[in-house]
Image: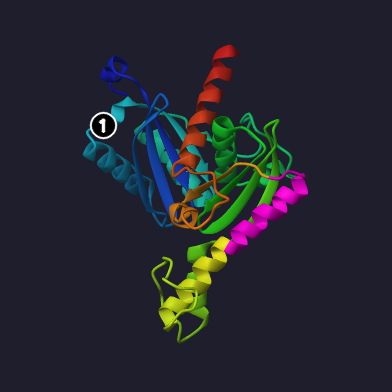
Amino acid sequence: MNNDATAVSPLLLAIDIGNTHTVFGLYEGESLLADWRITSPIARTMDECWLIVRFLSSDRGIKQERISRVGIASVVPNLTDIYIQMSRKYLTVEPLVIGGSLDTGIKVLYDDPSAVGADRICDAAAAYKKYGGPIIIIDFGTATTFDVVTARGEYLGGAIAPGIETAAADLHRRAAKLPRIDLHFPKSVIGQDTISSMQAGIMFSAVDSMEGIVRRIWEELGVERTPVVVTGGLAGLISARSRLITAVEPSLVLEGVRIIVERELRQEAGS
């Protein structure tokens, strides 16, 4: 790595690899300097991944030589391996790959902690640090996930439902006369044409089912209310229609990667 990197603050490259999109974030300390979202094709090579990282960071005027740490939260094993190789070859950095068996500061009470998605662990770690617990975190991605963290920072588990985009695409795929639609709320729940009817059914049912599961979680926890933090591509759109949501955190997984990487570094320094 270039020796000039020692003259400036080192950066953390946080990588959130999802089934549909991969999100990158460059952190200087606690500050998110830049973030990008790209698609997650399985066929992408290590060299292609590096070219993307290099182009995007250079476009923001950020030198790749400053990247001294890499954290990866992934639910796509093939891409995990590719980004690990990219980090080793082009950044000469051994990345921290986040998973349920890692000491993240969140005690995972799942029957099999290693089965918890890295994105859910990062969501939990970031939301708990900022808002405390008990707390519910909802991530609107390829799947819509509900995660519950206790006041003691214990990850209890949660629920997994089809994502809003996934449900819309599956409806189009399975019904010959139903088109692809843009996902936004129509003026009325009573649609006057096929597109507005689909939008009403998909979007309003997403809000109602989300609120229904939140209320069921509150009932099971024996509480009247907890903070409800949402993230993911459609979080802002859904939040505008629900009074149960406390906050929208667009970069929650990336923030969780940063928190967990920094925790790992502190533990290494103290050992």
- Residue furthest to the top: 270
Camera sees residue 111: no
- Image-quadrant location for residue 52: top left
Residue sitting at x 43%, y 66%: 185
The foreground one among 30 and 80 is: 30
The colour scheme used to paint the residues is rainbow
The amino acid pointed to by label 1 is: Ile
Give how far across and how far down residue 236 sits, in percent. 44, 52
Residue 110 pos. (x, y %): 73, 44
> In the rendered picture of this protein, how many numbered marks are placed on residues?
1
Name the residue located 47 percent from the left edge and 51 percent from the top edge.
232
Residue 199 falls within the magenta-colored stretch? no
Looking at the rendering, the stretch of residues picked out in magenta corresponds to 208-224
* Quadrant assignment for the N terminus: top left
Q: Which residue is under mark 1?
A: 62
Judging depth in this view, the residue of 25 and 140 nearest the camera is 140
